[in-house]
Amino acid sequence: MFELDHDLAQDIVDRAMAILPCNVNVMDSQGLILGSGEPERINTRHEGAQLVLANGRVVELDVQAAQCLKGVQPGVNLPLMLDGRLIGVLGLTGEPGQLRTFAELVRMTAEMLLGQRRLQVEQHWRRQRCDDLLALLLGGTGDSPRLLDEARQMGLKPHLPRTPCLFELKASQGTEALAAWLLGRYPDSWCVSPAAGSLLWCRPASVTVDETRLLDKLVAQAWPVQRLALGEAADDLAGLRRGYRWVRDLLAYGRDIVPQVRCLPLARYRLPAMLWRHRSDDSLDEWLGPLRKVMAKDASGQLLATLRAWCEHDGQSQACADALGIHRNSLRYRMERIAELSGIDPNRLAGMLTLYLGVQLLPADLWK
């Protein structure tokens, strides 16, 4: 339930006294002065306000009447209403006959401020509660009927198919603004910041987005976005949780292995990202071992660049040779040299897969 506090009461007082040549007091629902142009009166009891609270009407006090009450000066005291509920009292000090018109105008303004602040508080609470619900829905315990029912009541549509996308930002302070931008343009999206500098965007699966153009637009508008990991559409919450784990691993893979790539679709990097998840295991060195043998004899980096182009063009000789600007015979010679040094035959499926995964898992700093 919304209640007056010291900050809001003093804000009303300061605004009113910037215009009126009299002191203004704002009291809470117990008659305690929360805001005043006379600081020494704050947190003291105002018996005139208690009369207003007891009777629910305007109380005017002249000099004689004020002398009969404790902590009261002559003036006009008016009830402050919010949605039909008496939540405080507004008091103006002075001759009542001279203050009536001013007092009604100030009360109208004060009640408008109360309504505005109440709306801000409710919106803040709603955003915070939605953030909490989304964290639970995307966590391991987000399937309880009570939680799903509350999510539906908050308009989150928990059963809507969604596609998880994970942004990495240069500055962590940009996540909240980016979330607001995305939510404003893609209705029914979810936005959660799982860690500093990252934003999980779960957009409705029915929404078609060109992620490359979206990144270009964000960069053009000076958003501090470094890269985006794009998952696949999930039909339910369990699938969305798996999708979040995938894009999280995919983003870590992109950061360490292909930092120059801004958009990382899961469909393109699924296999290396899955292996990268186990990068602390010794087995990863087995994939990199053949490449290290090539690198030891490749001072110029020509063979490694050739192998990367070969992988990027799916082993198609002509397309690879054209990309490198060399003849197919030169490409064949280089691939034979790679096979000789690595001990892996790229013409066999197992050899092709081994070299492909080695290229995909080679840390970016080793390409230099």
Image (spheres, rainbow, N blue to C red):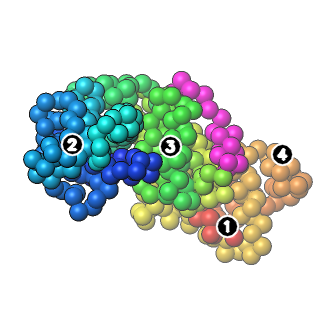
- Please tell me in which quadrant of the rendered image residue 108 appears: top left
Q: Nearer the viewer, residue 134 or 39?
A: 39
Residues packed near mark 3 inside 10 Å, few (<14), some (14 to 19) or many (20 plus): some
Q: Is residue 156 above or below residue 72?
A: above
Q: Which mark is residue 179?
A: 3
Label pair 1/3, CB-CB below 8 angstroms: no
Residue that carries the numbered disc 4 in the rendered image: 318
Q: Quadrant of the C terminus?
A: bottom right
Query: Image quarter for residue 56?
Result: top left
Q: Amino acid at mark 2?
A: Asp
Q: CA distance from mark 2 to mark 1?
A: 87 Å
Q: Quadrant of residue 216?
A: top right
First in sequence: mark 2 vs mark 3: 2
Q: Residues within 10 Å of mark 1 (few under 14, many from 20)?
A: few
Which residue occupies 28% across, 48% down? Answer: 93
Q: Amino acid at mark 1?
A: Trp
Q: CA distance from mark 1 to mark 3?
A: 35 Å
Percent from the top left, x then y, of residue 340?
70, 65
Q: Amino acid at mark 4?
A: Gln
Label 4: few (<14), some or many (≥20) within 10 Å?
Answer: some
Residue, disc 2: 62
Q: Nearer the viewer, mark 4 or mark 3?
A: 3
Q: Is residue 27 left or right of residue 346?
A: left
Q: Position of residue 73 (x, y in %)?
A: 21, 50
Residue 64 image offset from top left, x and y in percent: 15, 45
Mark 2 and mark 1 lie on one chain; the one further toward the N terminus is: 2
Say whether disc 4 or disc 3 marks the residue closer to the N-terminus: 3
Q: Is residue 224 visible?
A: yes
